[in-house]
Image (spheres, helix red, strand yellow):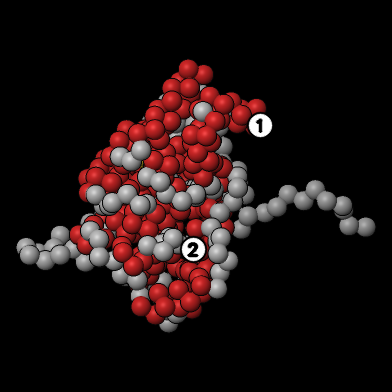
């Protein structure tokens, strides 16, 4: 790409046509080009719209796109659907990628903070000089004081995402620069907000003792989140696993919560408003539209301890008539790589052996009964369950991570808004 625009070769490749045909589209007014030096460049949205219009060859083979991955833009997209062009996440051939890099591999090699920066600006943070420490993400002092006061007035049983919602609004009101939408300002807001929200998870009075434990681990979002949620000591392997869970949950293309956040950003909502918008679908009860499914997994695993795995799984089959939460993902017919990665590392949690035995037995039952492969919800729910975290912790971990993705999508919208106007299909009474 050149300055965020496709080259002629890239545009032709995505459309599945020859370069001569591409320029024929230009001459017929179907596609606009700009001269960038000696090269012609094309707006990615214009290329995508032309692809879905049906004017290009419908039988064009899938070909390698600008990032080197085999890709096509769905021809079945309806004309009234908003079209978002992104360079953030690609889901393809059973894997998913952040800016062209395998996300599972990143979860093994990079911290959540590093991956968030990669999503936000396509650059890795500069490593500290010899003898220097990695700077932690810090909560703005004014925001912390205001949020702590607001949460003291909240209902004692407020759920993690309800605490998030309160904290985001209060933090926004304490930030005089919240309307700065520049590429440099949004990551500053993101770092402070994610650090703040990780602290709101400390709802069980750990504040006093956790401040002095494992100072090296506490510098990371994963380290302080672990201490807020689990009584197990934050060892390196445990924090590393939680870090991986955060990385794997940071973005997944246009999930419903991300779609909502991106629409808000396209109308130049500030970063806090974008996060508040994303929290709406994320707090829903419909598993396909929210991160609530890990909570259902946690509840099932707890039931397994009480009544046995067979009865607990069988009861869910009776109640719903379908496979329990935690299994199957349409985008990954052969298995969700996020769930597979988290489950393969579950032993790093340690904790009571009986909990790990429950997870193993549920997986065995699923295999025996021909359930679809486990997905990320099972991985997050099993992590929360084995670590002895409070209910809905898996959901909280996923949502905390998604804030990095929502803000990355917001940055794309601030730089180049998606101008769309969706239409409703009216079926009510006709006017007299």
Q: Residue at x 43, y 22 (%)?
A: 364
Q: Quadrant of the C terminus?
A: bottom right
257 vs 245, left or right, is right
Q: Toward the viewer: 354 or 181? A: 354
Is residue 330 positioned above or below 175 on the image?
above
Place of residue 173 in the rendered image (x, y in percent of width and height, measured from the top left)? 48, 78
Place of residue 74 in the rendered image (x, y in percent of width and height, measured from the top left)? 50, 38
Label 2 SS? helix
Residue occupying the far left of the picture: 130
Q: Residue at x 39, y 67 (%)?
A: 196
Label 2, residues with CA under 10 Å away: few <14, some 14-19, many ≥20: many
Residue 384 in view here = yes
* Residue 70 falls in image quadrant: top left
Dot 2 or dot 1: first in sequence order is: 2
Give the residue at mark 1.
319
Label 1 SS? helix
Q: Which mark is residue 163?
A: none
Is residue 321 positioned above or below 352 on the image?
above
Give the residue at mark 2.
164
12 vs 129, left or right, is right
Q: Residue at x 48, y 68 (%)?
A: 168
Which numbered mark, 2 or 1, is in the foreground of this view? 1
Place of residue 223 in the rendered image (x, y in percent of width and height, measured from the top left)? 29, 56
Place of residue 177 in the rendered image (x, y in percent of width and height, measured from the top left)? 41, 79
């Amino acid at each position: 790409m050149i300055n965020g625009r496709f080259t002629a070769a890239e545009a032709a490749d995505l459309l599945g046509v020859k370069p001569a045909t591409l320029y024929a589209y230009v001459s017929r007014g179907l596609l606009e080009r700009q001269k960038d030096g000696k090269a012609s460049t094309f707006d990615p949205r214009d290329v995508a719209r032309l692809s879905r219009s049906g004017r290009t060859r419908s039988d064009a083979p899938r070909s390698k796109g600008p990032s080197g991955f085999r890709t096509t833009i769905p021809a079945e997209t309806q004309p009234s659907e908003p079209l978002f062009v992104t360079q953030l996440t690609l889901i393809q051939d059973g894997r998913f990628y952040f800016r062209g890099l395998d996300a599972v591999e990143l979860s093994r090699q990079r911290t959540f903070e590093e991956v968030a920066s990669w999503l936000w600006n396509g650059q890795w943070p500069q490593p500290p000089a010899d003898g220097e420490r990695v700077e932690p993400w810090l909560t703005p002092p004014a925001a912390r004081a205001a949020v702590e006061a607001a949460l003291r007035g909240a209902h004692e049983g407020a759920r993690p995402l309800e605490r998030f919602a309160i904290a985001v609004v209060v933090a926004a009101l304490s930030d005089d620069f919240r309307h700065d939408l520049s590429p440099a300002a949004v990551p500053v807001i993101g770092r402070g907000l994610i650090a703040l929200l990780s602290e709101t998870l400390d709802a069980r009075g750990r504040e006093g003792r956790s401040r002095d434990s494992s100072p090296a681990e506490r510098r990371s979002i994963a380290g302080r989140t672990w201490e807020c949620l689990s009584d197990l000591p934050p060892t390196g392997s445990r924090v590393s696993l939680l870090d991986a869970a955060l990385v794997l949950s940071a973005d997944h293309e246009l999930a419903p919560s991300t779609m909502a956040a991106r629409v808000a950003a396209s109308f130049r909502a500030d970063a806090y408003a974008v996060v508040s918008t994303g929290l709406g679908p994320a707090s829903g009860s419909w598993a396909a539209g929210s991160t609530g499914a890990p909570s259902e997994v946690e509840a099932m695993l707890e039931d397994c301890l009480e009544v046995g795995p067979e009865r607990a799984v069988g009861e869910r089959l009776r109640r719903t008539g379908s496979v329990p939460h935690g299994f199957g993902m349409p985008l990954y017919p052969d298995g969700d790589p996020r769930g597979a990665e988290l489950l393969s590392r579950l032993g790093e949690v340690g904790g009571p052996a009986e909990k790990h035995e429950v997870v193993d037995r549920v997986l065995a039952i699923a295999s025996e009964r021909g359930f679809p492969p486990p997905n990320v919800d099972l991985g997050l729910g099993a992590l929360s369950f084995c670590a002895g975290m409070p209910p809905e912790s898996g959901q909280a971990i996923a949502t905390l991570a998604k804030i990095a993705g929502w803000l990355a999508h917001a940055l794309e919208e601030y730089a180049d808004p998606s101008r769309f106007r969706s239409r409703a299909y009216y079926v009510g009474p006709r006017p007299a």
